[in-house]
Image: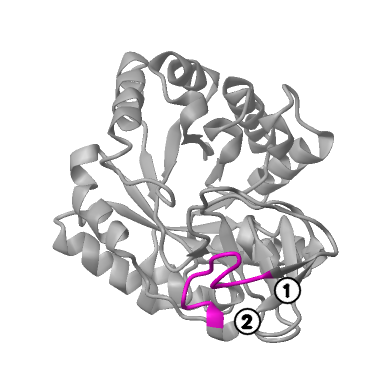
């Protein structure tokens, strides 16, 4: 089985020429992250993708990654720098937070921001200590380990994107933060209502609910996505590799396709060559039987999108020889 090689569409690769080079380097398909944009607003990027694929004679799959129940920061006028050890206020008069988060801000609660790059710990219901600081960017993810926040499965923007999906040539929908089969049933119902019954449904495993309910998700998904960014926020990081292995094994036994994603070539956002650990990670994911691998910011905003695809595709080919 040949491994699907997914890049992510973004400002760094949104022109036809760069996309052609990425296809030539081994990219077979592409993802569009709709956490910050809609299909209609990304129409120029999607058009460039289809033009590049046609020029290369490739029928590339277009996978849209929806907002789903993921918690995100709002847009800031000024993006603040959080300094380790300082105290910050969350909510009104401080760092804005979604209303659904506020009741869960209790003393001792950890607050992970931007895929865990920043870490706060609540001192009371309003003030938090900065444990791990850095620049706080707009629209980045929020995670509260151990909490049971239950946002709606889909946002208004998700439903509009599903309605537009067929017109934009979308072939697959990624549902983030899948918690149980009901989430997938809701997305499938929305696809059916939009006349998009043939669009594939990818279930992103990003929290412990998804891990624990994996077996019930299998019949409702076309592919399982081991999304290690937020999944790594749900547990100590040293436990993440074992969880990835267990999900991979269950998918193999069930004959279910699965994808591995997040930080596969993260260093290449700024470097023209990857680390040895990164290529080993890719090799092992493919060796373990994944049907697809994906890079995200590496091609969307990184400096070397073509080189990223070259390393991703060539490493996957090497691993396929050992399967």
The answer to the question of whether label 2 and label 1 lie on touching residues, with beta carbons closer than 8 A, is: yes
Q: Main secondary structure of the magenta part?
A: loop
- Please tell me which residue is depicted at 34% across the width and 67% down the height of the picture: 154
- Which quadrant of the figure has residue 268? top right
**Where is residue 284 shown, x and y percent of the image?**
72, 46
- Which quadrant of the figure has residue 104? bottom right
**Where is residue 115 shown, x and y percent of the image?**
64, 57
Is 92 magenta? The answer is: yes
Secondary structure category for the residue under label 2:
loop
Q: Which mark is residue 128?
A: 1
Q: Nearer the viewer, residue 227 or 128?
A: 128
Q: Which residue is mark 2?
A: 105
Q: Is residue 107 above or below residue 310?
A: below
Q: Is residue 67 above or below residue 126?
A: above
Q: Which residues are magenta?
A: 89-102
Q: Which mark is residue 280?
A: none
Q: Which callout, 2 or 1, points to the residue nearer the camera?
A: 1
- Please tell me which residue is depicted at 52% across the width and 47% down the height of the picture: 291
**Where is residue 67 shown, x and y percent of the image?**
41, 58
Q: Nearer the viewer, residue 49 or 291?
A: 49
Secondary structure category for the residue under label 1:
strand
Is 80 magenta? The answer is: no
Gap between marks 2 and 1 measured at Cα: 9 Å
Task: Say whether disc 2 or disc 1 marks the residue closer to the N-terminus.
Answer: 2
Q: Is residue 237 visible?
A: yes
- Please tell me which residue is depicted at 23% across the width and 60% down the height of the picture: 191
Q: Nearer the viewer, residue 156 or 25?
A: 156
- Please tell me which residue is depicted at 48% across the width and 58% down the height of the picture: 74
Q: Is residue 249 visible?
A: no
Q: Is residue 111 above or below residue 67?
A: below
């Amino acid at each position: 089985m040949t491994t699907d090689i997914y890049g992510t569409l973004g400002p760094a690769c949104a022109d036809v020429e760069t996309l052609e080079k990425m296809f030539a380097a081994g990219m077979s398909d592409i993802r569009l992250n709709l956490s910050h944009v809609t299909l209609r607003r990304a129409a120029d990027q999607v058009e460039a993708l289809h033009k590049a694929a046609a020029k290369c004679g490739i029928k590339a799959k277009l996978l849209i990654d929806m907002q789903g129940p993921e918690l995100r920061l709002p847009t800031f006028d000024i993006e603040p720098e959080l300094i380790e050890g300082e105290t910050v206020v969350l909510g009104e008069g401080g760092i804005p937070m979604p209303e659904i988060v506020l009741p869960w801000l209790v003393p001792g609660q950890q607050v992970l921001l931007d895929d865990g790059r920043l870490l706060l710990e609540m001192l009371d219901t309003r003030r938090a200590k900065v444990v791990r600081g850095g620049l706080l960017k707009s629209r980045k993810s929020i995670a509260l380990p151990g909490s049971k926040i239950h946002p709606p499965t889909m946002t208004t923007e998700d439903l509009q994107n599903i309605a537009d999906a067929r017109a934009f040539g979308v072939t697959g929908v990624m549902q983030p933060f899948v918690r149980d089969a009901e989430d997938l049933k809701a997305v499938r119902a929305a696809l059916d209502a939009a006349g998009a019954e043939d669009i594939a449904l990818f279930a992103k495993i990003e929290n412990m609910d998804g891990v624990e309910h994996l077996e019930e998700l299998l019949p409702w998904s076309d592919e399982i996505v081991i999304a290690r960014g937020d999944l790594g926020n749900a547990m100590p990081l040293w436990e993440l590799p074992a969880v990835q292995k267990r999900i991979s094994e269950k998918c193999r036994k069930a004959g279910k396709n699965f994808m591995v994603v997040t930080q596969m070539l993260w260093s290449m956002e700024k470097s023209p060559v990857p680390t040895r650990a990164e290529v080993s990670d890719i090799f092992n994911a493919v060796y373990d039987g994944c049907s697809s691998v994906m890079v995200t910011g590496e091609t969307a905003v990184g400096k070397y999108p073509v080189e990223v695809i070259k390393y991703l595709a060539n490493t996957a080919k090497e691993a396929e020889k050992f399967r």
